[in-house]
């Protein structure tokens, strides 16, 4: 079965980078720039992993995660937070919120691809 | 060539190897397309005390800069974000003003490397 990844990122340049960085994994990519539509997209596409920017134009990444975790249909999906040193806080506090892991910008492409591959394999 | 310039040349070559030259060129093109609006938006926002908008503009700029290994600019943008979060408008404005010439210098380097206008 083809693995699917939902990318939630409003930054066009980063989406371009993700497409190329993740291409070798052979996963199907679904993209959105908006956080509010994520629960619907997760229900309709059933991705194996969500890569979620924490600063979005319409809602915070933390609130997107909360809505996913509150719904039994979407509660168990793996969600990687993408953030920078200013907004990250520490990884432990993000994990306590329910994030599966953290990717910090500037993104190291090799580490990023390896991290995503690990979540797809699990 | 300065040490910083040599470091960037090596880093961007590594990105090209990993992502492909076409992708990094497209990323550079997006950086150039968005840059002036981000800088003027951030400056206008800090001048008027709209630190939320300033933070968003500098967050976008910092994300773009980091993805192209423009680390000095990415760091300045993050510092500005932190100042906006701390509601320190004068510090945020100083950081935006510091970022402007650096961002334009970086833009010039990208134009030269990828033959972009």
Image (cartoon, coloured by chain):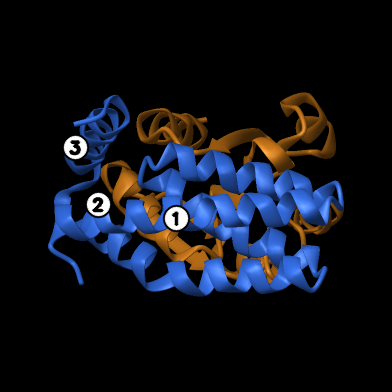
Q: Which callout, 3 or 2, points at the residue further toward the start of the chain?
A: 3
Q: Disc number at residue B13? A: 3
The residue beneath circle 1 is: B101
Q: Which callout, 1 or 2, points at the residue further toward the start of the chain?
A: 1
Mark 1: few/some/many CA within 10 Å (<14, 14-19, 20+):
few
The x and y percentages for residue B110 are 25, 55
Say whether residue B88 is left or right of residue B112.
Answer: right
Furthest-left residue in this view: B115
The x and y percentages for residue B61 are 52, 57
Q: Chain of mark 1?
A: B
Which residue: 66% across, 66% down? A38
Q: Chain of mark 3?
A: B
Q: Chain of mark 2?
A: B
Q: CA distance from mark 3 to mark 2?
A: 13 Å
Residue B45 vs residue A83, the one in the foreground: B45
Q: Circle 2 — which element? A: helix
Circles 3 and 2: CB distance less than 8 Å? no
Chain A's colour?
orange
The residue beneath circle 2 is: B109
Q: Circle 1 — which element? A: helix
Chain B's colour?
blue
Q: Disc number at residue B34? A: none
Q: CA distance from mark 3 to mark 1?
A: 24 Å
């Amino acid at each position: 079965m083809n693995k699917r990844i939902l990318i939630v990122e409003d930054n066009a340049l980063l989406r371009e980078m993700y497409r190329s960085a993740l291409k070798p994994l052979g996963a199907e990519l679904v993209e959105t720039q908006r956080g509010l539509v994520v629960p619907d997209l997760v229900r309709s596409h059933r991705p194996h992993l969500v890569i979620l920017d924490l600063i979005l134009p319409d809602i915070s990444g933390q609130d997107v995660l909360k809505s996913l975790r509150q719904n039994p249909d979407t509660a168990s999906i793996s969600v990687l937070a993408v953030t920078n040193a200013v907004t990250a806080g520490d990884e432990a506090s993000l994990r306590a919120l329910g994030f599966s892991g953290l990717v910090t910008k500037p993104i190291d492409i090799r580490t990023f691809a390896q991290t995503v591959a690990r979540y797809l394999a699990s | 060539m300065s040490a910083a310039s040599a470091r960037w040349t090596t880093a961007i070559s590594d990105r090209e190897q990993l992502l492909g030259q076409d992708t990094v060129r497209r990323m550079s093109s997006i950086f150039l397309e968005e840059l002036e609006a981000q800088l003027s938006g951030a400056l206008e926002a800090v001048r008027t005390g709209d630190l939320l908008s300033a933070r968003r503009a500098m967050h976008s700029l910092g994300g773009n800069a980091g993805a192209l290994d423009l680390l000095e600019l990415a760091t300045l943008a993050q510092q500005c974000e932190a100042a906006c979060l701390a509601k320190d408008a004068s510090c945020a404005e100083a950081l935006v003003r510091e970022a402007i010439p650096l961002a334009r210098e970086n833009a010039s380097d990208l134009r030269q490397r990828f033959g972009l206008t």
